[in-house]
Image (cartoon, coloured by chain):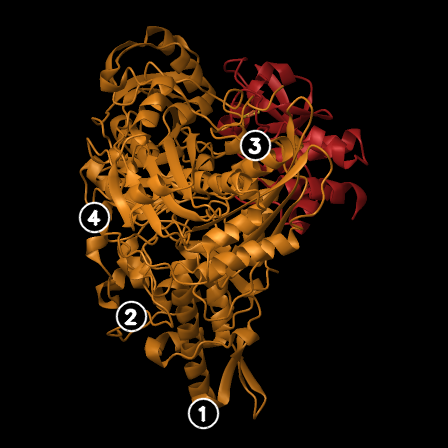
Amino acid sequence: MNIITRPHKLRGIEGRIGIEKISRRSVLTGLGIAGGLVLAAPVTSRQAFAAYETGAGKMPHGTVVDPRVFVAIASDGTVTIVAHRSEMGTGVRTSLPLVVAEEMEADWSRVKVAQAHGDEVKFGNQDTDGSRSTRHYLMPMREIGASARVMLEAAAAKRLGVPVTEVKAVNHEVVHSASGRRLGFGELAADAAKEPVPSIGSLKLKDPKDFRYLGKGQVSIVDLRDITVGTAQYGSDTRLPGMKYAVIARPPVTGGKLVSFDATDAMKVSGVEKVMEVQGWPWPSKFQPLGGVAVIARNTGAAIKGRDALKIVWDDGANGKYDSVAYRSELEQAARKPGLVVRKEGDVDGALKGADKVIVGEYYLPHLAHVSMETPVAVANVRDGKAEIWAPVQSPGGTREDAAKTLGIPEDNVTVNVTLLGGGFGRKSKCDFALEAALISKAIGAPVKVQWTREDDLRHDFLHTVSVERIEAGLDKSGKVIAWRHRSVAPTIASTFAANAVHAAPFELGMGLIDMPFEIANIQCENPEAAAHARIGWFRSVSNIPRAFAVQSMVGELAHATNRDQKDMLLELIGSPRLVKLDSVKDPWNYGEPFDSYPIDTGRLRRVVELVADKGGWGRSVPKGHGLGIAVHRSFVSYIATIVEVAVDDKGKLSIPRVDTAIDCGTFVNPERIQSQIEGAAIMGLSLAKYGEITFKDGKVQQGNFDNFPVVRMDEAPLITNVHIVPVAADTPPSGVGEPGVPPFAPALVNAIFAATGKRIRALPIGKQLET
Amino acid sequence: MIKLKINGQERNWDGDPDLPLLWFLRDEIGLTGTKYGCGQALCGSCTVIVDKEAVRSCITSVSDVVNREVTTIEGLHPTGDHAVQKAWRQVNVPQCGYCQAGQIMQAAALLLDNSKPTHDQIREAMSGNICRCGCYQRIENAVHLASTGV
Ligand code: FES
Ligand code: FES
């Protein structure tokens, strides 16, 4: 869920792909629609042009700004727009095509959305992660739509024999107002396809005040009806003639290996057809399969029953002693000693020594599992040196590359069809499950579906890391914070790609550690070493979870220590409205975005705090046993502040009467989906705060299903979550929405709990800590 | 040979009588609207209606539903316009949507039993159904809308 999605491969170096590299074959077969907007004359240069720069061009394969790739118009007027990002619940499959429709003046009710398969040369980068789809594609999609509009207008002007300046596309027609003549998009499609694609510099984008769809929030997601009638196609719903169903027993310890297995009893289970070994890769195994024993059957139920009957001997390997209790104290020890300095301003040691008072907070956050409702699942059909995969993947392009390498065939022989994702949260940016299906299909010579059970999902996840964050804050006599040392210690995602990676990668440091925005004279951030003993991966909002928890909890602790209101303390620490300079940080990571377009703007940070305080009724009086807590965090270059009202009863049971969140995500497409993402983020934040914990003993995950890895259900969900979106100037660059709602929730909650009970929670999950 | 009635249609099964109904529906007869989420009656994704009750198909074997009427999301309403389905669309409930078939079947069963549930009754009745995307506020509002029209 970050810019270096696949650091082991350095995919970024391929850079931007020019239009000329797009093969005619792929253009002409693009959508297979007669009369499609298919262009004959190549254009030489279509670099994205915008009022602001984003990091889109640095993503693997960059962006493709070409109406011929993304838009087709049939002669009956149906406009088909390609969605090249994966839909996992954010609404992106609707919002990006909606942007194209807006600019080309298409009538949304006559638009169909077609999902792109994995092909980054053709479509540009498809890694749906890092909360960057709108950020990177708002402007390219506008340009694509505007280009199509210009081509339609040019075709209409020729047909009507009038200058192009006299015609205008309006709601699926091109109108010549002087004569009242009008031509539908369908009638113009074939001619428009022959028009040259205009240069991006010549495009005139719509004035935002003329938007019909953008920023309005009145368009429902395209899959809404299918979802409510059960016909929406998720990864698990793919069915092929002759398809077999498989489940796999994987090594229970990360890095473990199969020694031997006995399939006698499994083969006796009705419906089981075959038992076979699946190849595993040595640890760190990147996104490659873990290996194990597959049971192949005529249906999933039989495969599961067969797997239960297997007798397997495993070699647990180097991580067989991983123990969460012992590991926590290792992390705590590391956090109490100096570590690699990753940001340094002033003299923290001196300032802490001279401080009137030093407040120390040590915060522990355990491993978390993603548990998207749809577990990992994939269908593959591999035969005659060709592979076709159907899978709910966030990384269709990467999946295609990895499948080609794993199978030893050229990428051109691999097709990755992207289904809907039944949730992703970062788990499905790793394609191990699709590779398993490919390997098994190749071995049995038939299409196969590999289904992960919930137990598989919890025990073989790419987990959120486990961390200790230790903050020491020094105060002078007046109560002003003059020193801030933050040590962050956690196994790194880089350990999934490189053996012996023990320090945070730059993208992890940039998530709430080195970008800490407070105006304090002496600041030092350190990153002591931590070794990984499990697969670590991106989990919705990633390292921002522990960092925001620590920093914003410390704000609450400081408010208490100095007898001040939490919000006042927070605003004092943020300090003056300014752009935070990270001069002492070597190569600071900013979610892959240039600081010019996306600075760390404390004015905007202050504004969300003030907005949420205003709308969320900060300071209102609450009943006994209730408390209010506040937290703010910038992540994915958006600014989010949350107020939680908690109620804790006399047995220590907590409930959430109300949540308010203010978000400044720059320019936005669909406020209704922003709202749903923030509502969901509150639930996910509450789940991880209350219950989220994966623990290891003897190298094995101790949880297996929702009974021992609970998530929040409706009866404990906040009674109401209000979302307040900051209105911004139309030229403000768009920023992330999917992830940034999560980090401020847990610290706002523990600050509220402190206000309600006087009890300071420093380790998550809350679990039984409040029980009396 | 086991004879079943699913969405008003006769179906036969001559395999393992203990096969969970969920996998029979999804894999054997292609009714993939019913989803797997946990296999242990913990999440509600696999909810179907048997006679008039919400049932977790992941822990219900095929032999358990002989001579009973099984309704899946595909059979809830002939045109997909059950009051619950309509309310779901009006409130824009789904995010990823994966849990929603189970949620809708649970809500439909609730309304069969109690046509005007209070908010507390809705929260209670729907708490067996997990939505990892966190659409609870809207689910609650949609059930309320389906039952009251407002
Ligand atoms: S799959 Fe049946 S309740 Fe979860
Ligand atoms: S909508 Fe995604 S799990 Fe409910």
Q: Which chain is orange?
A: A
> How far apart in space, not on screen, are marks 2 and 4 (Cα)?
22 Å
What subunit carries mark 2? A
Residue A10: which numbered mark, if any? 4
Three-letter residue code for mark 3: Thr
Three-letter residue code for mark 4: Leu
Q: Are marks 1 and 3 in contact (CB under 8 Å)?
A: no
* Colour for chain B in the figure: red
The quarter holding residue A598 reads bottom left
Between marks 3 and 4 in the image, the one whose residue lies nearer the viewer: 4
In the depicted view, which residue is nearer to us: A9 or A618?
A618
Between marks 3 and 2 in the image, the one whose residue lies nearer the viewer: 2
Three-letter residue code for mark 1: Gly
Tell me if mark 1 has few (under 14), some (14-19) or many (20+) residues whose alpha carbon lies within 10 angstroms of its own: few
Three-letter residue code for mark 2: Gln
Image position, residue B102 (x, y; %)? 61, 33
Marks 3, 2 in one chain: no
Marks 2, 4 in one chain: yes
Q: Secondary structure at mark 4?
A: loop
- Do we see residue A722 in this rendering? yes
> How far apart in space, not on screen, are marks 1 and 4 (Cα)?
52 Å
A736 lies above or below A400: below
> How far apart in space, not on screen, are marks 3 and 2 (Cα)?
46 Å
> How far apart in space, not on screen, are marks 2 and 1 (Cα)?
32 Å
What subunit carries mark 3? B
Q: Are marks 2 and 1 in contact (CB under 8 Å)?
A: no
Q: Label 2, on which residue?
A: A47
Between marks 1 and 4 in the image, the one whose residue lies nearer the viewer: 4
Tell me if mark 2 has few (under 14), some (14-19) or many (20+) residues whose alpha carbon lies within 10 angstroms of its own: some
